[in-house]
Image (cartoon, rainbow, N blue to C red):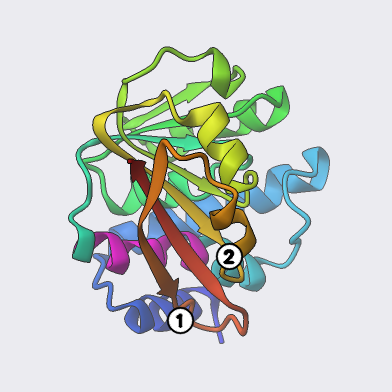
Amino acid sequence: MSLAAALREGLAGLGLDLPAAVQAKLLAYVALLKKWNATYNLTAIRDEGEMVTQHLLDSLSVLPALQELALGGRRWADIGSGAGLPGIPLAIVRPELDMTLVETVAKKSAFQRQAKIELGLANLTMINRRVEELPGGAFDAVISRAFAELADFVRLAGHLPAPDGRLYAMKGLLPEDEISRLPQAWAVAACIRLSVPGLDAQRHLIVLERA
């Protein structure tokens, strides 16, 4: 199966009907990631087909859940975004979002800047700093993918959302122990089982809000 066909099939499994130009931009991101990965080791995944499943579809799997919750405003931050995941796929698919990628590793931030240029993502901003150094209250939503334990996510990034903003943690297995260790100032607003087409592994989205 071609990459384009695999992406189409996966998007259909997620219930996402995207224009051909958007799908082409998602595949262009995968091609750019593979090119840079050969030199800069941005991700352990080398195969483009696996990148479609484990990077693109995994990142986009939050959209059906977020649409049920309401998307949570325009100003988004992706914390510890690495190669731009999930922020870049989300920015491609939802151009109305103002997506800020926060990454401390310079080579990864450089890749993100190149992706913005080559993919024409005007809604993307890169910050090459530690998350705890950023000013508070600047975002409607802050998302992370395999970034840190929930208590650490709250400790490092809890100041970033606006007063009614939320934190979104993408996790594998349901992190019941992590949830039990959350500080009292934060509560779980929703815990959603995600389905990633082609991926035989558990995924969850933990939605956190101030208690």
Q: Is residue 186 above or below residue 56?
A: above
Residue 105: percent from left, percent from top: 71, 26
Q: Is residue 24 visible in the rendered structure shown here?
A: yes
As measured in the structure, the alpha-carbon distance from the residue carrying label 1 to the one carrying label 2 is 37 Å
Q: Residue at x 58, y 77 (%)?
A: 202
Of helix, strand and loop, which one carries label 2? helix
Q: Is residue 25 above or below residue 173?
A: above
Residue 19: percent from left, percent from top: 24, 65
What numbered label is drawn on residue 5?
1
Crowd class of label 1 (few under 14; some 14 to 19; many from 20; radius 10 Å): few
In the rendered picture of this protein, how many numbered marks are placed on residues? 2
Residue placed most toward the observer, 149 or 30: 149
Amino acid type of the residue that numbered disc 2 sits on in the rendered structure: Glu
**9 magenta-colored:** no
Q: Is residue 33 above or below residue 62?
A: above
Residue 153 occupies quadrant? top right
Amino acid type of the residue that numbered disc 1 sits on in the rendered structure: Ala
Residue 23: percent from left, percent from top: 37, 63
Residue 203: percent from left, percent from top: 53, 71
**Residue wearing tag 2:** 176
Query: On the picture, is 167 further left or further right than 18?
Result: right
Q: Residue at x 44, y 73 (%)?
A: 194
Residue range of the region highlighted in magenta in the rendering: 57-67
Residue 18 occupies quadrant? bottom left
Query: On the picture, is 164 further left or further right than 159?
Result: left
Crowd class of label 2 (few under 14; some 14 to 19; many from 20; radius 10 Å): few
Residue placed most toward the observer, 55 or 144: 144
What is the magenta segment's predominant secondary structure? helix
Quadrant of the drawing holding the C terminus: top left
Residue placed most toward the observer, 147 or 10: 147
